[in-house]
Image (cartoon, helix red, strand yellow):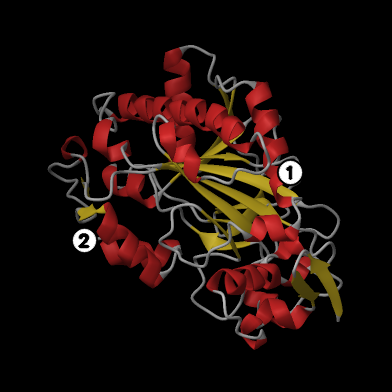
Amino acid sequence: MSVKHFGYIAFVSSPELLCSPAHLPVPSSQDFQIKQRAMANLLSSAPIHASLPDCFVFPPDQRPPASSQAVSLPVIDLSRGRDEVRRAVLDAGKELGFFQVVNHGVSAEAIRDMEAVCAEFFRLPAEEKAAFYSEDTDKPNRLFSSTTYELGDEKYWRDCLRLACGSPVGDTKNNWPDKPKKLREVVEKFVEPTRGVGMELLRLLCEGMGLRPDYFEGDLTGGDVIINVNHYPPCPAPGLTLGLPPHCDRNLITLLLQSTVPGLQVSYKGDWINVESVPNAFVVNFGHLLEIATNGVLKSIEHRAMTNAALARTSVATFIMPAADIPIGPAEELVGEGNPPRYRTVTFDEFMRVYKTVGARRESVEKAFKL
């Protein structure tokens, strides 16, 4: 076990710390205690991990390997004609629930800057990152380790920076980290056009399903846009753990900047398929709330993140969310004779209470809301 000193805080880099930080001495200052826990828990605080702590090891049945079949997600060029794009988006959404989009209008510069500043954040000295660390799951802006999906004892090989973004961003950026120096400026220039892509995809889906194009405008997409910057450090035993567990998203629609380092896998016909990286593309998938709103026409599909031994992977997920107290149920246009409502109407607040209780697996969430 080695001890590294960062400023006035000593960080002990041992596997036992990552699994059980409770042995740390209780300091007199609450801020000091939070920093100590951050130094112990954040995977990115250690320059290297020589072995995988036991709490990150999953039983074999919880980490089945990916399928060897060559299945690629559709790549949709949004600069094509509207009728062609609308059909492609709806067909891909119904068939796989996942697809990639290119020529979407978010500049290559904005994407490169976002990738660079996020990677730079996780390279900051451990003490500087620790200042933004929090284990309060209700805090909208925070840095944390592992995941909020955990219901068992295992932990996931990930650090995450979560940012809540108004639309427009406005003063909400003042609640984000002020280091690296350009982080706030870069995130703002990235998130606003990225949200625009998500809203355009929702309009295309509405047109394809026979809903009015602006069905999801207003309160149904009026919550903060949430950004998760997921960082997966090199893992000493990638075959024994997961970066993120199998889960479905809790929002309406997600746009993922997935990194050139592979790691995303999608559930497909009982197997797991690898998602290939496409330059400057967003991987798009639907959350549970879109499945409810479309009465099951569109499905929320499980996905997971794997780790690797050689390279760190940093991905950026942009989640479009409803306002907290807005009721969400099957659209009237998608319900009728022979096609009754399949889901009950819930507010986003109620949905999240259940989601946090039962976990993020598709079967559990579907059972909680299906009629």
Question: Circle 1 sits on which residue?
Answer: 120
- Badge 1 marks a residue whose secondary structure is helix
Q: Residue at x 76, y 72 (%)?
A: 11
Measured Cα–Cα span from mark 1 to mark 2? 47 Å
The image quarter containing residue 360 is: bottom left
Whether residue 341 sits left or right of residue 221 in the image: it is: left
Whether residue 191 sits left or right of residue 260 in the image: it is: left
The image quarter containing residue 47 is: bottom right
Can residue 328 be seen in the rendering of this structure?
Answer: no
Is 45 located above or below residue 340 in the figure? below
Whether residue 37 sits left or right of residue 90 in the image: it is: right
Observer-nearest residue: 87 or 31?
31
Give, as a three-letter code, the residue at label 1: Glu
Q: Earlier in the sequence, mark 1 or mark 2?
A: 1
The image quarter containing residue 160 is: bottom right
Can residue 164 be seen in the rendering of this structure?
Answer: yes
Give, as a three-letter code, the residue at label 2: Leu
Question: Circle 2 sits on which residue?
Answer: 371
- Badge 2 marks a residue whose secondary structure is loop
Check the picture and name the quadrant holding the C terminus.
bottom left
Is 23 located above or below residue 268 in the figure? below
Observer-nearest residue: 116 or 342?
116
Q: Residue furthest top?
A: 81
Q: Residues within 10 Å of mark 2 (few under 14, many from 20)?
A: few
Q: Which mark is residue 181?
A: none
Measured from the top left, where is residue 223 in percent x and y?
33, 42
Q: Nearer the viewer, mark 1 or mark 2?
A: 1
Is 322 located above or below residue 369 in the figure? above
Check the picture and name the quadrant holding the N terminus.
bottom right
